């Protein structure tokens, strides 16, 4: 079925108390609107039209892409009015799917079910809520006090729903109608040709002076078009965001869903309630993740990997058998097999570690390649460097790679030993098997297989006396 998608994203979001447009607030590291656009793209539509209003320029700048068109709703006169602004940009597709930029978690399978239900007319995505306060109710033929008609039930099966006759808003509903638990999500799939016609017939003759999209339902019925429904299995699938509290609630729902999927895939989570995935996390077999870890961007973990508590990993690839100890921060880095990172280690962008590398407490690595079996176990900075195999870098070692304007490279050959508290002033090369004496400042090439050190002569001044406090 050929498909158009309209995403309504013009709301101001006053209850967010923020200068940032509501649909640009992040959920799991991605804006609410981006979640909706990604879901729409998965349906391979002929076109996507985003209707903007408040903060429209910021929204257009953030979401600009070749496959997205924008329409401006100014002023905002209701959902029907918003869809009217998009109509001139719609293709001649058979169906138009209408989504909301602040309803971020509707699964693709649910949207496919809705579009499929619209194959013979229009379809509305509904949900059944224990507390439907504030929602429009789906009124069906034969319903009494919100119950479905009993016809069609066989051997205890759920009764078949009656035909949708109208949608009544909560404020206008009678006590019997308010007892209905099936609510209108606002998400619907409508034949494009009919949609254009029905929108032209909408009236704003109501207290709010707005054009309501739900008013196309009686127009559809009057034209003999079937009004079907698809039901969202979970309430969160149709939950919108109007406040920071609601945003936080959906964040936890989304993270719980991710944690459940990880557990079902065999990942061990110390506490499923204390993990945050703000992007994509792919895990091999026997991966263990401790509490309070954050995964951002695209993270790939191989087999038998342990991530300790309170770690942050962003755009990282880690091969099998590696341990990342507590409070470590890895970003845009590649880590080989059977490495040990941390605790309190930092791998910055461009860090590439071969297998069996140890990066220990308070060691920072930036834009450097470190060969197999090398170690920097304590208090070191390695930047813009090429470190060979089986190199030992002592505590307090610094590669001085920056002169205030330019960056320079340090090269350390295989098997070199860098004594503690050494300063390597780049550009500089340390030969294979070289030894650098502790406390040295190296500014010239150090030959391989030899000891190089620089130290001032140690003096003891026998006549020296400690300073005395002056009397006032």
Image (cartoon, rainbow, N blue to C red):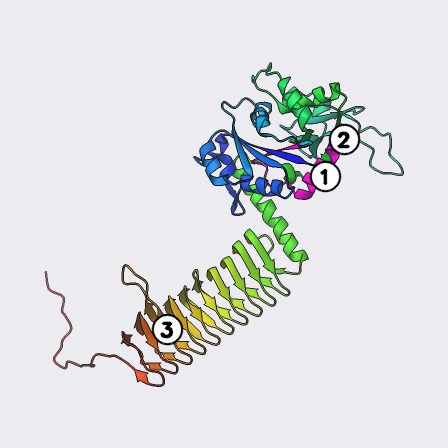
Residue 89: which quarter of the image? top right
Query: In the picture shown, does residue 83 fall above or below 446?
Result: above
Q: Is residue 92 left or right of residue 315?
A: right
Mark 1 to mark 3 CA distance (whole Å): 59 Å
Residue 213: which quarter of the image? top right
What is the secondary structure assignment of the residue under circle 3?
A: strand
Residue 139: which quarter of the image? top right
Q: Residue at x 39, y 78 (%)?
A: 413
Looking at the image, tell me whether mark 2 or mark 3 is earlier in sequence order: 2
Q: What is the number of callouts on the image?
A: 3
Asked if the stretch drawn in magenta spans residue 99, the answer is yes
What is the secondary structure assignment of the residue under circle 1?
A: helix
Mark 2 to mark 3 CA distance (whole Å): 69 Å
Asked if the stretch drawn in magenta spans residue 250, the answer is no
Q: Residue 116 at x, y = what percent?
A: 73, 37
- Nearer the observer, 79 or 448: 448
Q: Please give the residue where the numbered disc 3 appears in the rendered image.
A: 411
What is the secondary structure assignment of the residue under circle 2?
A: helix
Q: Residue 70 at x, y = what percent?
A: 52, 32
The mark found on residue 120 in the picture is 2
Which mark's residue is nearer the viewer, 1 or 2? 2
Provide the residue span drawn in magenta. Answer: 96-119
Q: Quadrant of the N terminus?
A: top right
- Is residue 308 visible from the viewing direction of this image? no
Q: Please give the residue where the numbered disc 1 appears in the rendered image.
A: 113
Looking at the image, tell me whether mark 1 or mark 3 is earlier in sequence order: 1
Neighbour class for label 3 at 10 Å: few (<14), some, many (≥20)? many
């Amino acid at each position: 079925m050929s498909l158009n998608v309209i995403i309504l994203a013009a709301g101001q979001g006053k209850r967010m108390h923020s200068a940032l447009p509501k649909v640009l607030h992040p959920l799991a590291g991605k804006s609410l609107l981006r979640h909706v656009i990604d879901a729409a793209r998965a349906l391979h539509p002929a076109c996507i039209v985003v209707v903007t209003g408040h903060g429209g320029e910021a929204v257009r700048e953030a979401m600009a892409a070749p496959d997205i068109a924008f329409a401006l709703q100014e002023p905002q006169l209701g959902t029907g009015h918003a869809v009217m602004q998009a109509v001139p940009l719609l293709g001649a597709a058979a169906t138009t799917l209408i989504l909301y930029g602040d309803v971020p978690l509707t699964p693709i399978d649910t949207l496919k079910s809705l579009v499929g239900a619209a194959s013979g007319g229009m379809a509305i995505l509904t949900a059944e809520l224990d507390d439907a306060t504030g929602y429009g109710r789906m009124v069906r033929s034969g319903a009494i006090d919100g119950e479905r008609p009993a016809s069609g039930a066989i051997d205890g099966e759920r009764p078949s729903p009656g035909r949708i006759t109208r949608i009544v808003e909560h404020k206008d509903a009678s006590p019997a109608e308010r007892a209905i638990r099936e609510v209108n999500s606002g998400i619907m799939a409508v034949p494009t040709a009919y949609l254009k016609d029905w929108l032209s017939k909408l009236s704003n003759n109501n207290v709010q002076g707005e054009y309501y999209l739900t008013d196309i339902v009686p127009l559809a019925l009057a034209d003999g078009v079937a009004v079907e429904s698809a039901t969202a299995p979970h309430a969160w699938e149709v939950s919108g965001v109007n406040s920071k509290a609601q945003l936080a609630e959906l964040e936890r729902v989304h993270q719980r869903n991710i944690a459940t999927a990880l557990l079902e895939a065999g990942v061990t989570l110390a506490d499923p309630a204390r993990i945050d995935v703000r992007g994509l996390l792919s895990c091999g077999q026997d991966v263990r993740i401790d509490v309070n870890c954050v995964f951002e961007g695209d993270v790939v973990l191989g087999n038998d990997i342990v991530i300790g508590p309170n770690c942050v990993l962003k755009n990282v690839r880690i091969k099998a058998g590696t341990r990342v100890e507590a409070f470590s921060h890895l970003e845009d880095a590649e880590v080989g097999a059977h490495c040990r990172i941390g605790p309190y280690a930092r791998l910055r962008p461009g860090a590439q570690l071969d297998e069996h590398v140890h990066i220990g407490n308070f060691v920072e690595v930036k834009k450097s390649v470190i060969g197999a079996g090398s170690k920097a176990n304590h208090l070191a900075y390695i930047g813009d460097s090429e470190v060979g195999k089986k190199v030992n870098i002592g505590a307090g070692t610094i590669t001085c790679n920056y002169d205030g304007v330019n960056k320079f490279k340090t090269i350390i050959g295989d098997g070199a030993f860098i004594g503690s508290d050494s300063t390597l002033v780049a550009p500089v090369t340390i030969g294979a098997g070289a030894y650098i004496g502790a406390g040295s400042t190296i500014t010239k090439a150090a030959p391989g297989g030899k000891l190089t050190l620089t130290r001032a002569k140690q003096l003891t001044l026998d006549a020296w006396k400690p300073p005395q406090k002056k009397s006032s």
